[in-house]
Image (spheres, grey):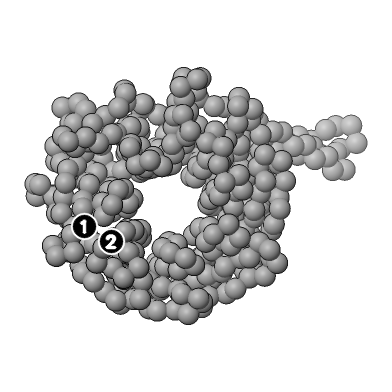
Amino acid sequence: SFSVTIVRLLEGMSEVKQINERAKSFHSLVVLGDGETVCCGSEEHPVIFVYSDDVVSKLYGHGKGVMLLRARDNLLASGGADGVVKVWSVLEGVCLHSFHLYIHDITALQWVDNGRIASGDARGGLTVWNLEDDNPTALRGHGTRIAHIEIVGDGIIVSADSFGRVVLWKENNNISLAEKGRDISCICHLREVSTMEDGILIVLAIDQSLVMYATNGTRIHEQPIQFPIERNSKWGVSFLRPVGQCQLLIAIDQFACDTNIEDNMVLCVTYDAKDGFFQDFGFSGTNVNPLDSLGSITAMDVHEDESAVLVGCEKKNLYQLVTNEQGFQQEGDTVGPFDGRITAAIFLKEGYACVTNHGELFLRTAIRGDQNIVFPERIIQEETV
């Protein structure tokens, strides 16, 4: 994360401590409301790296690594390993709010609305922060690391911890969902579901199944995730993303050596009130190259108009997919392989970007083409006698 060199000077026997700061790993990536300014964070660095219009900059304020980033219009929320949640005006380069209730790592972070942020930490603390008065609301219902926070409606929050406890919060009152002790890998929700009173269907990826709930806490249905061909048991779900009305993308987390090369690693399924989810189509590496295998899906993003999907895979390649009557089709060429594993990918206003765990930031835009962004090093020298 930081390389430290101490040089002892003969004159006066003073010491110069030189800290060489460089981006060695990225774990999160967001784009601001302008569709162009991207922000990168790393669990290893107390710094937020910013790229906009060929200008690179950094935001300083966290005492430890930046665990999570979430954008809302042109505001940026960050959660650190120092237990602090910060809100930034990135374009002005200033921190607007700094929230600190506990000292534990921030492990989940979401905007509730324009004026509130929900954060979860490594000890089960779930807090809603109000930007107007800086007052926190502590929601008590977990006793271990918060792994997921999903905002599913007007002020409705769903949270899940590492022991499989799922809690639905409405007006600060909690409803415990009956999944304790199971492996919750993802949470999302579908809108405009005609059979639901408020149109919202909560979907949990648990073990190797999809479990559905209403926003009143009623358990609707559970069904296993099906594949066209048989696969072994060493797999899970890495991402759930809603697309279109009652449609869902499922990305699979499984090592390439454990799966058939022709098997689908991204599934598109549609929800039916009578039969549950059924598969429309899927995508595997062989859709692009007969000898290509995707392996685990490590990053995914859906375009805001739901016309395209970005998929980053274990093999360090990035694919842009579009859908048509034949299913998934690749748009453009495959990007990669990168030096590191792709940890996040996002669509921009006119293009897309991704980061890796080797500190790489890649952008592809219509105006500038392909760019590999290198953040300048920052050297700090401290002299002591």
- Residue 149 pos. (x, y %): 45, 62
Amino acid of disc 2: Val
Mark 2 burial class by Cα count in 10 Å: few <14, some 14-19, many 20+: some
The numbered dot on residue 271 is: 1
Image position of 332 (left or right of 292): right
Which residue sits at x=33%, y=36%? 308
Look at the image and tell me whether residue 271 can be seen: yes
Which residue sits at x=28%, y=34%? 322
Kindly check if marks 2 and 1 are in contact, taking CB atoms under 8 A apart as contact.
Answer: yes
Image position of 341 (left or right of 155): left
Image position of 32 (left or right of 219): right
Look at the image and tell me whether residue 284 can be seen: no
Amino acid of disc 1: Tyr
Which residue sits at x=60%, y=24%? 54
Task: Give the residue number, with chain letter if any, for mark 2.
Answer: 193
Residue 330 sits in quarter: top left
- Residue 283 pos. (x, y %): 21, 38
Mark 1 burial class by Cα count in 10 Å: few <14, some 14-19, many 20+: some
Work out which residue is located at the far right of the displayed protein and give it. 12
- Residue 243 pos. (x, y %): 31, 48
Which residue sits at x=50%, y=76%? 171
Which of discs 2 and 1 lies nearer the camera? The answer is 2
